[in-house]
Amino acid sequence: MSEQMTSEAAPRRRSLLMLLPLVAFMALAAIFWFRLGNDDPSRIPSALIGHPAPQTALPALEGLSNNGTQVPGLDPAAFKGKVSIVNVWASWCVPCHEEAPLLTELAKDTRIQLVGINYKDTADNARRFLGRYGNPFASVGVDGNGRAAIEWGVYGVPETFIVGRDGKIAYKLVGPITPDNLESVVKAQIDRAVKAGS
């Protein structure tokens, strides 16, 4: 009798041991899914928040003019004394096309200056992009090799930074400006930066 019970228990133990890796894998998969599914990628913290904006000057986008005057490139000295919105964009970036009209709306706010960093783009394509949607930027710096984006801690385009009057980064939005986050997040952070500098 005991021999029969021992011989029946052995296959059951083997079956349980074979299921153990599957159960462990499913538990890990559930943890990863939960973490990825519930985290908002726009909330990735930036090590640069509270630190001075990178002091990287960038050349102007060749041939981009406003009323016959060349639109200047990125000059870090221009951040001092003004609340600046720095938008990293490219003509090949699909979400950049979607956020372009919202940037035009944002540029109407006289309390801020909107600055563009054109990331790894060609001058012709960048000018066509701004010709199609309108140029909301007071200045556009060209980051042809992506070095400035690294200094800004950019994960991918588009990304938007709010730089306070003190020249320090106050906020970072990873991903596009959308109708949902324009009012609830971006404008709220602009208001906060404007009040902080008053």
Image: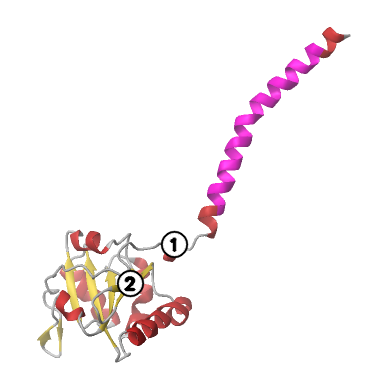
Say above or below: 65 vs 11.
below
Q: How many marks?
A: 2
172 relative position to 55: left or right? right
Cα gap from disc 1 to disc 2, whole angstroms: 13 Å
Q: Say what amino acid the circle numbered 1 marks.
A: Pro
Residue 18 makes an appearance in the image:
yes
- Does dot 1 land on a helix, a strand or a loop? helix
Q: Position of residue 57 (x, y in %)?
A: 13, 70
Q: Say what amino acid the circle numbered 2 marks.
A: Thr
The reply to whether the magenta stretch includes residue 12 is yes
Q: Position of residue 77 (x, y in %)?
A: 15, 78
Residue at the disc numbered 1: 41
Say above or below: 146 vs 123.
above
The reply to whether the magenta stretch includes residue 86 is no
Main secondary-structure element of the magenta-colored stretch? helix
Residue 74 makes an appearance in the image:
no
Q: Which residue occupies the foreground of this view, 65 or 190?
A: 190
Q: Residues within 10 Å of mark 1 (few under 14, many from 20)?
A: few
Which residue is rendered at x = 85% and y = 9% of the image? 2
Q: Which residues are magenta?
A: 6-34
Residue 90 sits in quarter: bottom left
Residue 71 sits in quarter: bottom left
157 relative position to 65: left or right? right
Which quarter of the rendered picture does the C terminus lie within?
bottom left
**Residue sitting at the far right:** 1
Say above or below: 137 vs 198.
above
Q: Which residue occupies the foreground of this view, 61 or 159?
A: 159
Residue at the disc numbered 2: 160
Say above or below: 60 vs 113.
above
Q: Position of residue 1 (x, y in %)?
A: 89, 9
- Does dot 2 land on a helix, a strand or a loop? strand
